[in-house]
Structures are given as C-alpha cells and as structure tokens.
Amino acid sequence: MVLKRVHGKTVLSKMPKKPAARSAKQQMCAQGFKLATAYAKSVMQNPELKALYSAEAKRRGVINAYNMAVSDYLKAPEISHINAEAYTGTQKGELITIEVSDNFKVVQVKVTILHDERTVEEGNAILIADIWQYATTALNSTLLGSKIIVTVLDRPNNRVVKEIVL
C-alpha cells in the first residue's frame, strides 16, 4: 500500500504496477515523439521559425508554437493528386499540376520524369494559387511508359514520394 496526496487529501492506494516492456510499435512511436520534441525545441530557439509557428498556431487555435511544431513534425505532407493530362512530351512548357496538403507548410515539390530508368528531366514546381505547377523543360518523344515521380518536403523535412506511370 502507498499513501499519496490527491486534491489536498491523503489517500491510501495500491502499489503502482511496473509497466510492461514496450512493443516495437510503442518504441517507434516514443522515438517519433522524442524527435518531434527535439524539432519543436529547435524551432523555439529560432526567432523566425518561432514567429511562423506562433502565427499559424494562433490562426488555427492551437495552444502554442511548440505544439504546432510537434504536430508539424509528426504529420508528413500528402500528395492528393498529380495531373499530367496536359503533358504530351511534344513541347517544352507543358504543365504538370500537383495538389499537396500539409498541416503547416510544404517547402519543396520536386518533379522527376523518367523513361526506362533514365532521367528525362527534373526540377522544382512552383506554387500558384494553392496548386503546385511544374512546367516541363525537355521533350519526351517516348511518353508511353514514362514515370512522373513527385517528391514533397515540408519544413521539418518529412518527405513523401508519389509516382505515376504514363
């Protein structure tokens, strides 16, 4: 038996049980939180990042910048759609659009076009009206079977890759 104070009163309770060993999944989760808190602490030390996270936390009703940074670290961006309908490979400047979401900010969207594992072209998309757009820079005469690989990176360096085959 153990005596402890609860709401200002002394109470008698059972001896606490020693927690069981963590499973591999629990250990991975704990490691993720450890890394997320380290990231959030680094954000708090950087006045520019702290201001960005503070503003976003206030806008979303999150408690503070620290919690916003932890949340950002723990949630990777998502690629919801890659639209390559306008891409024929016959001329430069054809647009490939990418719809991406993140709980804070996507900092880079990279597009790579491959054919037979050979790089046809690659470059960064630009954000225009909430849609990432990539204008092609090379011709691709063998469009059929080509791959478009989109790599998205957010502020804490969470990386997500999605591939489509033409």
Image (cartoon, rainbow, N blue to C red):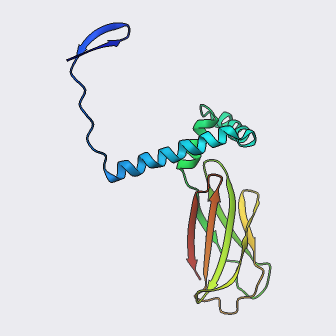
Tell me what residue is drawn at x 38 percent, y 49 percent: 27
Quadrant in the picture for the N terminus? top left
Q: Dividing the picture into quarters, in which one does residue 136 lie?
A: bottom right
Quadrant in the picture for the C terminus? bottom right
- Find residue 19 and report its horizontal and vertical position in percent: 27, 37
Q: In this view, does 133 lie above or below 29?
A: below
Q: In terms of depth relative to the viewer, which is nearer, 33 or 140?
A: 33
- Find residue 77 and report its horizontal and vertical position in percent: 58, 56
Q: In terms of depth relative to the viewer, which is nearer, 97 or 55?
A: 55
Tell me what residue is drawn at x 38 percent, y 10 percent: 7
Q: In this view, does 97 lie above or below 33?
A: below
- Find residue 70 and report its horizontal and vertical position in percent: 56, 42
In this view, which residue lies farthest toward the top? Answer: 9
- Find residue 109 and report its horizontal and vertical position in percent: 68, 64
Tell me what residue is drawn at x 34 percent, y 13 percent: 6
In this view, which residue lies farthest toward the bottom? Answer: 141
Report the side of 43 relative to 95 (left or right). left
Q: Dividing the picture into quarters, in which one does residue 81 lie?
A: bottom right
Question: What count of labels does the image hold?
Answer: 0
Tell me what residue is drawn at x 59 percent, y 47 percent: 72
